[in-house]
Image (cartoon, rainbow, N blue to C red):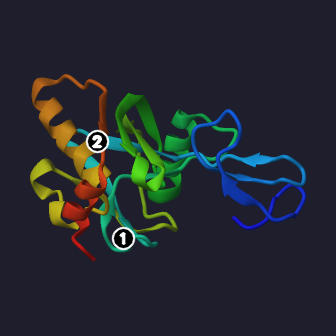
């Protein structure tokens, strides 16, 4: 950030009085520009014993498989965001049962909130998906999943499904986790 979005003057990056971390500060109008993590909300849509996955039509990770998810918008709840993203990416309506995984990615300023859901009807590829398909556990394209958050959510689901218990899973993805997942590329 170079300029204040309130008055247009140059900003500086420093720790404001009474704060504990650097922020963009405008000395002209006194605005402190807070930058906070982005919430990614999505669903784990299930139909019988199968899970709905979308093959991404957009970067990043175009061509890789994911659960329907995306950035939360202002003026919506996390459940509304998850349902909207599922409708946008998979043209699918879902009945949401509750938060299932909460995964922190502090090094890229994201928090994933994935909700367990039942597929309510049909589905089709939305504009951000090349294709959408239902997969049995043994059919999941594990080597073609887009993100470690998606793999972690799916692995929790299949382990929990054996016991028919679906507790909330809270975890972190570290830079080292991402490097192991994506390689050094």
Q: Nearer the viewer, residue 179 or 69?
A: 179
Q: Residues within 10 Å of mark 2 (few under 14, many from 20)?
A: some
Q: Nearer the viewer, residue 9 or 164?
A: 9
Q: Circles 1 and 2: CB distance less than 8 Å?
A: no
The residue at which mark 1 appears reads as 61
Label 1: which secondary element = loop
Looking at the picture, does residue 103 appear above or below residue 28? Answer: above
The picture places residue 156, in percent across and down from the top left corner, at: 20, 38
Which residue is situated farthest in the bottom direction here?
A: 185
Label 2: which secondary element = strand
Q: Which image quarter holds the C terminus? A: bottom left
Q: Nearer the viewer, residue 105 or 117?
A: 105
Decide if residue 88 is on the left or right side of residue 142.
right
Among numbered discs 1 and 2, the one appearing first in the sequence: 2
Q: Nearer the viewer, mark 1 or mark 2?
A: 1
Looking at the picture, does residue 159 appear above or below residue 93? Answer: above
The picture places residue 160, in percent across and down from the top left corner, at: 16, 30
Q: Residues within 10 Å of mark 1 (few under 14, many from 20)?
A: some
Decide if residue 48 is on the left or right side of residue 36.
left
Q: Which residue is drawn at the image coordinates 52% and 68% (left, top)?
A: 127
The picture places residue 70, in percent across and down from the top left corner, at: 49, 53
Residue 134 can be seen in this image: no
Decide if residue 185 is on the left or right side of residue 102.
left
The picture places residue 119, in percent across and down from the top left corner, at: 37, 41
Q: Which residue is drawn at the image coordinates 90% and 50% (left, top)?
A: 29
Residue 110 can be seen in this image: yes
Q: Which image quarter holds the N terminus? A: bottom right
Q: CA distance from mark 1 to mark 2?
A: 25 Å
Q: Which residue is drawn at the image coordinates 29% and 50% (left, top)?
A: 174
The residue at which mark 2 appears reads as 47
């Amino acid at each position: 950030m170079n300029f204040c979005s309130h008055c247009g003057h140059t900003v500086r990056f420093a720790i404001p009085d009474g704060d504990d971390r650097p922020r963009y500060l405008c000395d002209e109008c006194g605005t402190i520009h807070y930058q906070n993590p982005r919430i990614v909300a999505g669903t784990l849509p299930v139909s019988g014993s199968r899970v709905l996955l979308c093959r991404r039509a957009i970067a990043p990770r175009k061509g890789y498989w994911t659960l329907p998810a995306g950035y939360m918008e202002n003026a919506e709840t996390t459940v509304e965001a998850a349902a909207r993203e599922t409708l946008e990416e998979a043209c699918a309506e879902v009945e949401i049962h509750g938060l299932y995984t909460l995964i922190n990615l502090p090094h890229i300023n994201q928090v994933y909130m994935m909700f367990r859901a039942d597929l309510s009807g049909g589905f089709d590829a939305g504009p951000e998906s090349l294709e959408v398909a239902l997969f049995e556990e043994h059919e999941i394209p594990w080597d073609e999943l887009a993100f470690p958050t998606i793999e972690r959510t799916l692995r929790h689901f299949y382990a929990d499904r054996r016991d028919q218990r679906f507790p909330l899973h809270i975890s972190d993805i570290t830079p080292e986790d991402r490097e192991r997942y994506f390689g050094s590329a």
